[in-house]
Image (spheres, rainbow, N blue to C red):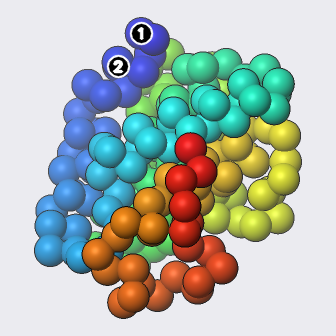
Amino acid sequence: MKRIDEILEHEVFKKQLSDINEAEKNRMFCNHDMEHLMDVARIAWILNLEDGIGLDRELVYATALLHDIGKGRQYKEGISHEIAGGEIAQTILKDCGFTEEEIFRVKRAILSHRDPAVKNDKNLRGVIYRADKASRPCFMCKMSKECNWPEEKKNTHVIY
């Protein structure tokens, strides 16, 4: 996946991920690090295959890798990470050879990755939403009792 490798090596991606890691270095709850991004990518790909949606693998991975990329700006500037992420993703995706249509789809999925209205959609937005939620191993988290996620949102067993 040539374009995915380009995203991972992109200076803006690396800088934003570094900013997130720095901001979350003392965070006791779920982090938005490379492990989370890769978990979302792999789960999204599984969901795509299981549901027979037919999404392009690079598009799934690109979206998953970039869905939380705006977290650094959220921590520093208070801007919603979905909005910041869409802006950051556009620059990275364009530099990495994604088409305008692909960029539009990725940005749309990033903007809605926390919107429960897309939860059951059989498209990129729905897959990323579901994968993001399924990626958290709450059942083994040492901070589960202190977590502010409602109990009904917590993953109490292995899903993927």
Q: Quadrant of residue 55?
A: top right
The residue depicted at 19 percent of the width and 50 percent of the height is 18
Packing grade of label 2 (10 A; few <14, some 14-19, many >=20) is some
| Secondary structure beneath label 2 | helix
Where 46 sits versus 131, above or below?
A: above
Taking the image as shown, residue 101 lies to the left or right of residue 34, namely right
- Amino acid carrying label 1: it is Lys
* Residue at the top extreme of this rendering: 2
Q: Position of residue 12 (x, y in %)?
A: 29, 39
Real-space Cα separation, disc 1 to disc 2, in angstroms: 6 Å
Compared to residue 21, the image places residue 42 above or below, namely above
Instruction: Quadrant for the C terminus, please.
Output: top right
> Residue 93's x, y, as percent?
49, 29
Element type at marker 1?
helix
Asked whether the viewer can see residue 89, the reply is no
Given the image, on which type of amino acid does mark 2 rest?
Answer: Glu
**Mark on residue 131?**
none
| Foreground of the two, 37 or 136 | 136
Where residue 87 appears, x then y in whole percent? 50, 50
Q: In the rendered structure, are the residues bearing label 1 and label 2 in contact, judged by CB atoms less than 8 Å apart?
A: yes
Q: Nearer the viewer, residue 108 or 118?
A: 118
Q: Residues within 10 Å of mark 1 (few under 14, many from 20)?
A: few
Residue drawn where x is 58% and y is 85% of the image: 150
The answer to whether one can see residue 47 in this image is yes
Q: Position of residue 109 (x, y in %)?
A: 67, 47
Relative to 114, 68 lies left or right? left
* Figure check: 121 above or below 47: below
Q: Could you tell me which residue is drawn at 81 percent across and 27 percent down? A: 53
Q: How many marks?
A: 2
User: What residue is disc 2 on?
Assistant: 6
Which part of the image, by quadrant, shows the N terminus? Answer: top left
- Judging by the rendered image, the residue that carries numbered circle 1 is 2
